[in-house]
Image (cartoon, rainbow, N blue to C red):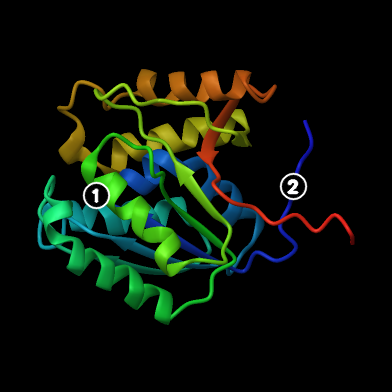
C-alpha cells in the first residue's frame, strides 16, 4: 500500500462530541504523532462533559495521549444526546476554534456516524475547516454503523497496547459499560490492521483530498 505523508504537520485540531471520543477514535494515532513530533500544537474541543467528573478525566487522558505536545483543551457542557437541538452553540464553538488556529490536520467524528451527537459535530467540521485535511474517526458501539473506511494508520503493538491501557485507566467512569474493555478496542484495531497489512491500525474516513500530481 502507498503512503501519503503531509509536507507539514505542526498543528492539529481534535474534535469530540463526548469525553473519550477522541481517545477511542484516534488515541493510537495521537501517540504516534506526538511521540514523533515533540512540541506539536494540539487544540482539542469536546462539546459535552463540562462541569462533571468526565471533564477531569478528559484533561488527564488527552495529556497522556499527547506526550510532549503543546496542548489546549476546551470541554463544554452541551447535553449528551441532544446536540441537534443545540446546533447553534455547537456551531459557534467550532467557529471560535477555527478563528484561533490554522491546523495542518483536523481529527474528529465522521459524518456517517449513527450517533446523533457525533454526526452533528462531524457535519460542522467542513463548514469551518473548509480547506484542511480532515480525518473522521470511528467508534464501535451498539448502533452497528461500522463501515468501510479508506484511510489507515498502522499502530505498532506497543502503541495499540498503550492506547488500551490509557483508555481503561483514564476513564474510570466508563468501566461499567459492557463494551468498554480491552477486547473491544484491540479487536477493532486488529480488524483494521488486517485491512492495511499491519497487525493493528486505526481507520479513518476522508471525504476530500487535493493531490498535487504535477509536482
Give how far apart the Cα atoms at labels 1 and 2 are.
Answer: 30 Å
Pinpoint residue 175: horizontal percent, then vertical percent: 20, 31
- Give coordinates of residue 144: x percent, y percent: 31, 21
Residue at image point 35% right, 59% down? 124
Q: Return the mark for residue 18.
A: 1
The residue where tag 2 is placed is: 4
**What kind of element bears circle 1?**
loop
Residue 61 falls left or right of residue 34: left
User: Is residue 86 rendered to the left or right of residue 214?
Assistant: left
In the figure, 67 relative to 88: above or below? above
Residue for point 30% across, 45% down: 119
SS at mark 2 in the image: loop
Q: Contact (CB < 8 A) between labels 1 and 2?
A: no
**Disc on res. 213:** none
Residue 14: x and y in percent read: 42, 58
Mark 2 is surrounded, within 10 Å at the Cα level, by few (under 14), some (14 to 19) or many (20 or more) other residues, namely few
Q: Residue at x 20, y 21 (%)?
A: 178
Q: Quadrant of residue 126?
A: bottom left
Query: Is the N terminus in the top left, top right, bottom left or bottom right quadrant?
Result: top right
Amino acid at each position: 500500500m502507498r503512503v501519503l505523508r503531509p509536507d507539514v504537520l505542526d498543528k492539529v485540531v481534535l474534535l469530540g462530541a463526548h469525553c473519550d471520543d477522541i481517545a477511542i477514535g484516534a488515541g493510537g494515532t495521537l501517540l504516534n504523532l506526538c511521540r514523533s513530533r515533540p512540541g506539536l500544537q494540539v487544540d482539542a474541543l469536546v462539546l459535552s462533559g463540562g462541569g462533571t467528573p468526565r471533564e477531569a478525566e478528559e484533561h488527564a487522558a488527552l495529556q497522556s495521549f499527547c506526550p510532549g505536545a503543546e496542548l489546549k483543551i476546551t470541554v463544554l457542557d452541551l447535553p449528551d444526546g441532544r446536540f441537534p437541538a443545540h446546533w447553534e452553540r455547537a456551531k459557534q464553538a467550532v467557529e471560535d476554534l477555527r478563528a484561533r488556529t490554522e491546523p495542518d490536520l483536523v481529527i474528529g467524528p465522521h459524518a456517517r456516524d449513527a450517533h446523533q451527537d457525533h454526526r452533528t459535530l462531524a457535519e460542522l467540521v467542513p463548514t469551518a475547516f473548509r480547506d484542511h485535511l480532515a480525518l473522521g474517526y470511528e467508534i464501535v458501539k451498539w448502533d452497528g454503523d461500522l463501515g468501510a473506511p479508506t484511510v489507515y494508520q498502522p499502530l505498532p503493538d506497543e502503541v495499540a497496547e498503550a492506547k488500551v491501557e490509557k483508555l481503561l485507566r483514564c476513564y474510570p467512569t466508563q468501566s461499567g459499560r459492557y463494551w468498554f474493555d480491552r477486547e473491544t478496542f484491540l479487536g477493532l484495531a486488529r480488524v483494521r490492521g488486517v485491512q492495511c497489512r499491519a497487525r493493528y491500525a486505526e481507520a479513518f474516513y476522508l471525504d476530500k483530498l487535493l493531490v498535487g500530481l504535477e509536482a
